[in-house]
Amino acid sequence: MSINNIVSLLGDKADYLLNHESKTISKSAIHVPGGDFVDRIWVHSDRNPQVLRNIQAMYNTGRLAGTGYLSILPVDQGIEHSAGASFAKNPIYFDPENIIELAIEGGCNAVATTFGGLGMVARKYAHKIPFIVKVNHNEFLTYPNKFDQVMFANVKSCWDLGAAAIGATIYFGSDESTRQLQEVSEAFQYAHELGMSTILWCYLRNPAFKKDGVDYHLSADLTGQANHLGVTIEADIIKQKLPENNGGYLALNTKESAYGKNDKRIYDELTSSHPIDLCRYQVANCYMGRAGLINSGGASTGAADLTEAVTTAVINKRAGGMGLISGRKAFQRPMNEGVAILNAIQDVYLTKEVTIA
């Protein structure tokens, strides 16, 4: 895909997204991805040589190999959203081998799915594409449904099946977040000790975050703070949803109910209403990009999936992010079409004309 194709897909948003120059946090302050990222950033950290090798393995795989950018296929929806609801559109993905084949055919850097799924075909594929084992999940069968991430996998067992990394979710803001934070912190420490990298699904969940008809679960200030908590427990990569608004702290911190700490410069100087600037605030909270920010691809909406995927990739790249982790837009359609979606995302990161804002 050329820059002309990207411009065409972006339509009337092309100039707005491709020519924006950020006046908030300077791009010179961001540690942008590149082929030398391990040598430039991670070699100075406390990560041991085995971790560095596994991080590099992800950077060296797929169509984005050598760029420092990541395209990851995540398929944990069989638990998080239920298998039937997730795979009914394309039942071949009940079989985890097809999930891995999609990641390989789609030119991804890694595949992220469940312990059981990867374990079923580990000997056939662990040496062909880096595995990311999702170690905790919100099981969706308890009645009434509840939302709590619980451990499904043993960290040592992830290492035994050949994983390059483990992934975990924390629902920041929820009643269970303190326990989840402690569990995931311990899991990440042990994963690093064994030599695996760590990726945090860094999500917000609390009904109070919806106020006066506005959903602040995707607010830049709140998601940015979630990112900051995530890198504090040594997540090497943060998976976060793209911000859609800002001012969550302002909305929740009222005379009737104090919430958190705030500074007006977050809104006056460090962010603007532009989606690239909002995303850059997320990057800044990942130690200015030292820990990579990968944004979610989001749900499949049908015909608009290609445009939505490319738009998200452009915003992430221009903000200083490290890539996209996109699942439903790829696996909830025929494999050849899923490959095309994944390749289009990757093309954004391969296109030199899409620059850092």
Image (cartoon, grey):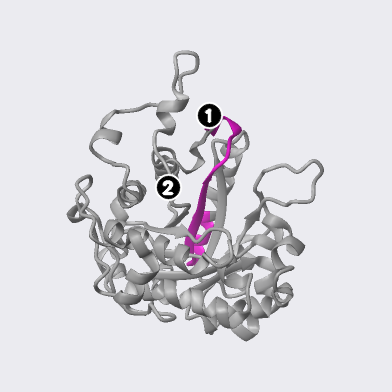
Using residue 94 as the reference point, say whether residue 254 is left or right of it: left
Residue depicted at 44% across the width and 22% down the height = 253
Residue type at mark 1 is Lys
Percent across and percent down for residue 114 are 65, 65
Residue depicted at 43% across the width and 46% down the height = 244
- Quadrant in which the N terminus is drawn: bottom left
Using residue 291 as the reference point, say whether residue 92 is left or right of it: right
Percent across and percent down for residue 214 are 51, 34
**Which residue in the protein does label 1 denote?**
211
Query: Marks 2 and 1, Cα distance to the nearest angstrom?
Result: 16 Å
Give yes or no for contact between labels 2 and 1 (Cβ–Cβ under 8 Å).
Answer: no
**Residue 205 part of the magenta segment:** yes
Percent across and percent down for residue 140 are 74, 51
Q: Secondary structure at mark 2?
A: loop
Q: Which stretch appears magenta? A: 188-211
**Which residue in the protein does label 2 denote?**
243
In the rendered structure, find residue 183 and report the number of the disc placed on it: none
Residue type at mark 2 is Pro
Q: Residues within 10 Å of mark 1 (few under 14, many from 20)?
A: few
Percent across and percent down for residue 166 are 54, 62
Work out whether 176 lies above or below 113. above
* 315 or 321, nearer to the observer: 315
Q: Secondary structure at mark 1?
A: strand
Q: Is residue 58 visible?
A: no
